[in-house]
Amino acid sequence: MAVTVTRVGHAGGGVRTMVRTLSHTLKRERGGITSDDATLFLVEWRGST
């Protein structure tokens, strides 16, 4: 997974794309099965303060 995080991070595309790609990769690697109640939560700050 560390290799995937590095690859996706360097690919660009923004935070949303990175989180989506990592989520899909993790699900695919686990055979489409999740085994816990973990939630991905994304906050993207677009303000100056």
Image (spheres, grey):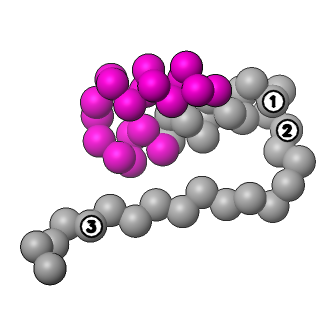
- Left or right of 40: which side holds 32? right
Mark 2: few/some/many CA within 10 Å (<14, 14-19, 20+): few
Q: Type of residue at label 1?
A: Arg
Quadrant of the drawing holding the N terminus: top right
- Left or right of 49: which side holds 8? right
Residue 32 coordinates in the image, percent (x, y): 80, 33
Residue picked out by circle 2: 33
Compare marks 2 and 3 and give the one earlier in the sequence.
2
Residue 44 coordinates in the image, percent (x, y): 32, 62
Q: Are marks 1 and 2 in contact (CB under 8 Å)?
A: yes
Q: Type of residue at label 3?
A: Trp
Residue 8 numbered tag? none
Q: Is residue 18 magenta?
A: yes
Residue occupying image coordinates x 72% and y 35%:
27
Q: Main secondary structure of the magenta part?
A: helix
User: Marks 2 and 3, Cα distance to the nearest angstrom?
Assistant: 31 Å
Residue 30 numbered tag? 1
Quadrant of the drawing holding the C terminus: bottom left
Residue picked out by circle 3: 45
Q: Residue furthest left?
A: 48
